């Protein structure tokens, strides 16, 4: 009888825990799935264009020679800028690009 009670209790607890875990995954899935699908449809050229457009529209970066290259969602920034504030502005534009997975900052500040 004691063995039956222990087995029953273990089975009941396992069922409750597994049911709760299943519901949490189900709730989280719809939120995560659209983000993954949206990023999967963005090409490297689109990411590069978005970053370059943001840089060209920022008057504080006028005259700066910044190269943007995107490979598989990884954005590489190279060039020379006049200040750390400009580096931060460029990084912000790159981070805002939809589909960008990581940013490789190779910008240098002119001294």
Image (cartoon, rainbow, N blue to C red):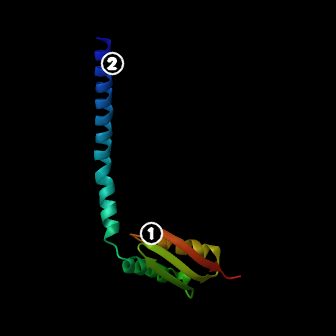
Kindly give the residue lying farthest to the top in the view shown: 1
Q: Quadrant of residue 5?
A: top left
Question: As displayed, is residue 57 above or below residue 22?
Answer: below
> Residue 93, how many percent across, how many down?
48, 73
- Going 57% across and 71% down the picture, which residue do you hit? 88
Q: Quadrant of residue 63?
A: bottom right
Q: Nearer the viewer, residue 3 or 93?
A: 3
| Left or right: 108 in relation to 72 | right
Q: Neighbour class for label 2 at 10 Å: few (<14), some, many (≥20)?
A: few
Instruction: Tell me the CA gap for discs 1 and 2.
Output: 55 Å
Q: Nearer the viewer, residue 69 or 55?
A: 69
Q: Which residue is mark 2?
A: 6
Question: As displayed, is residue 38 above or below residue 63?
Answer: above
Check the picture and name the quadrant holding the N terminus: top left
Kindly give the residue lying farthest to the right in the view shown: 111
- Tell whether label 2 touches label 1 (CB within 8 Å): no
Q: Nearer the viewer, residue 43 or 53?
A: 43
- Going 28% across and 53% down the picture, which residue do you hit? 30
Q: Neighbour class for label 1 at 10 Å: few (<14), some, many (≥20)?
A: few
Q: Nearer the viewer, residue 65 or 10?
A: 10
- Going 39% across and 77% down the picture, which residue do you hit? 44
Q: Which residue is mark 1?
A: 96
Q: Nearer the viewer, mark 1 or mark 2?
A: 2
Check the picture and name the quadrant holding the C terminus: bottom right
Going from the N terminus, do you reach mark 1 or mark 2 first?
2
> Residue 54, how many percent across, how many down?
45, 78
| Left or right: 76 in relation to 36 | right
- At mark 1, the secondary structure is helix
């Amino acid at each position: 009888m004691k063995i039956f009670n222990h087995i029953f209790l273990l089975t009941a607890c396992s069922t409750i825990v597994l049911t709760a875990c299943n519901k949490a995954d189900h709730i989280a899935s719809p939120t995560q799935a659209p983000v993954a699908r949206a990023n999967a449809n963005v090409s490297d050229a689109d990411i590069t264009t978005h970053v370059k457009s943001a840089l060209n529209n920022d008057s504080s970066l006028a005259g700066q020679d910044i190269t943007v290259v995107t490979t598989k969602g990884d954005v590489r920034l190279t060039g020379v800028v006049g200040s750390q504030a400009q580096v931060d502005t460029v990084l912000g534009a790159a981070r805002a690009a939809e589909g960008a997975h990581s940013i490789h900052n190779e910008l240098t500040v002119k001294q």
